[in-house]
Amino acid sequence: MNLDDPRAEMRRLTRRSLITGGIAAAAGFGAWEWLKSRREDNGIYWPLRLVLRANEQITRDYFRETRLSRTFPPSAIDAPRANGGIGLEQPVPADWSLRVTGASDSRPEFQLSLADIQALPKVVQITEFKCIEGWSIIQQWGGARFSDFVSKYAPDWVDYDPGNDYAGLQTPGGEYYVGLDMDSAVHPQTLLAYELNGKPLEPKHGAPLRLAVPIKYGIKNLKRIGTISFVHTRPPDYWAEQGYDYYAGF
Ligand SMILES: Nc1nc2c(c(=O)[nH]1)N[C@H]1C(S)=C(S)[C@@H](COP(=O)(O)O)O[C@H]1N2
Ligand SMILES: [Mo]
């Protein structure tokens, strides 16, 4: 923000929203061509269902992919802070593997190793981690994009249905669980993380694999993923059941 010259700042913001609007319009035109080629759903193309949805919802979904969380330089990285140990009471299971369900009709359930996830392109990003309790820290995450995982291992979900599709994640024993709308799951900064601040994840931070989703509060960043399920109804969510906002995002 340029606080010295509020009018210049207003002009800048206006220019930016005009540019954003232009991009959205152009994207909308291309998207329409694409949408027309989509499957029919209950006898109507799903764009028709799209227009039936509230504007706010459409805007949220539409911009989801392009609205990036701020990133920071390495000098900003804070020491990790462990918080919340539900589902981490036992040591990391020696036979840990990632169970995936609902990813494709032909393969309703399968297991992946950490090496399978590490074989996907590695992304390193420095983002702010915000806990709903009121603290936040800058952390560097290393891992695979959830979207790359979807492309490779959940082929039926590449063309997911916005607003009606979800990923559910659980600890190996099912003690902690979160539900994520697919827009957030495939956001480019949503990672299946196996490194924190340049080192392999420690057990208290979710070894061997956790979710790092900077567009959501800490509660959604499930540590020690045991199962990922692709589902068409809102998955159970530990903290939503305690009265917290299900969406828990920014
Ligand atoms: N399995 C599991 N994951 C969890 C939690 C938990 O209790 N169990 N707590 C959540 C909360 S509230 C926060 S703030 C973050 C903290 O992650 P950190 O310990 O790596 O900082 O983990 C989230 N993921
Ligand atoms: Mo949290």
Image (cartoon, helix red, strand yellow):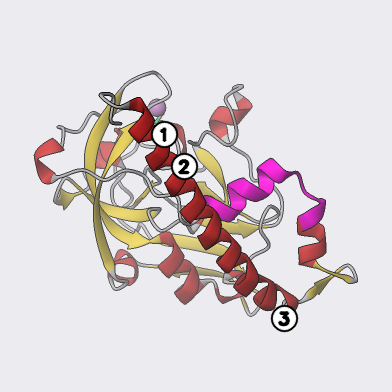
Front position in the image: 36 or 122: 36
What residue is disc 1 on?
A: 10
Relative to 86, does residue 167 appear above or below in the rendering? below
In space, the residues marked 1 and 2 are separated at their CA atoms by: 6 Å
- Disc ID at residue 20: none
Asked whether disc 1 touches disc 2, contact meaning CB atoms under 8 Å apart, the reply is yes
Amino acid type at image mark 2: Thr
* Residue 223, position as x, y percentages in the image: 37, 42
Taking the image as shown, residue 179 lies to the left or right of residue 210, namely right
Secondary structure mostly seen in magenta is helix
What residue is disc 3 on?
A: 37
Q: Earlier in the sequence, mark 3 or mark 2?
A: 2
- Say which quarter of the image contains residue 241: top right
The residue under the point 60% across, 62% down is 25
The residue under the point 70% across, 56% down is 232
What residue is disc 2 on?
A: 14
Residue 222 shows in this picture? no
Taking the image as shown, residue 62 lies to the left or right of residue 48, namely left
Number of labels in the image equals: 3
Which contiguous range is marked in magenta? 51-64
Taking the image as shown, residue 11 lies to the left or right of residue 140, namely right
